[in-house]
Image: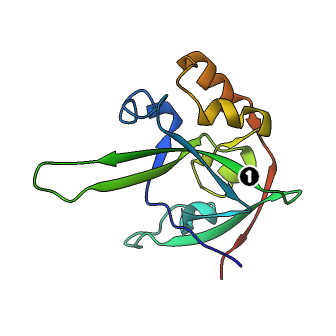
Amino acid sequence: MLTVLQFQNNARRDNLSGFWSSVYGTRHAILLVGSFFENVPTHLYEKRQLAPNEPEANTVLHFQPNPPEPMIVACLWSHWTGSGERDLDSFAAVTDEPPAEIAETGHQRCIISLREENVAGWLNPLPLDKTRLEQILTDRQVPYYEHRIAA
């Protein structure tokens, strides 16, 4: 069975000590995925400037690692509460600068796929310091990503 999840949020690695500081180092999760989709501005995908008065449009690209294997995506989660407001459960994939083949499509971010040997450390971050967590995010799987335009 194919399940498609749509993320509205990503946790930019360069902002983990900013906006995400209250959950980075305490509330970690993982997500296993075989591929992912990204919206890319069409003109960037086509490697051209927008024409005068041309509205910006998106092209949806489907990225898949080659060789195909599940990716262990580093994630953060939180439970937000506000006085008189509905509770909000938040879940975000950690992203970083893209590898060259993704950047060439015009997309500027890529999910971080953890190495299997780092999963326990990522999921149990409390005994670890931020330096070790950064090492886990740096020591990641970096497959070659093939892409196609999604139907």
Binning the other alpha carbons within 10 Å of mark 1 as few (below 14), some (14 to 19) or many (20 upward) gives many
Q: Quadrant of residue 66?
A: bottom right
**Color encoding of the figure:** rainbow
Tag count in the figure?
1
- Residue 74 spot, x, y in % from top left: 61, 43
- Residue 143 spot, x, y in % from top left: 81, 47
Of residues 95 and 71, the one drawn nearer to the viewer in this rendering: 71
Of residues 26 and 114, the one drawn nearer to the viewer in this rendering: 26
Q: Residue at x 62, y 33 (%)?
A: 122
In what quadrant of the picture does the N terminus appear? bottom right
Q: Hey, which residue is sitting farthest bottom in the picture?
A: 151
From the image, tell me which residue sits under label 1: 71
Left-right relation of 18 to 142: left
Left-right relation of 7 to 72: left
- Residue 56 spot, x, y in % from top left: 43, 69
Q: Secondary structure at mark 1?
A: strand
Q: Hey, which residue is sitting farthest right in the picture?
A: 67
- In the picture shown, does residue 126 fall above or below 94? above
In what quadrant of the picture does the C terminus appear? bottom right
Q: Residue at x 74, y 52 (%)?
A: 71
- In the picture shown, does residue 82 fall above or below 49? above
Amino acid at pointer 1: Met
Q: Residue at x 43, y 60 (%)?
A: 8
Q: Residue at x 42, y 73 (%)?
A: 54
- Residue 118 spot, x, y in % from top left: 73, 32
Left-right relation of 95 to 52: right
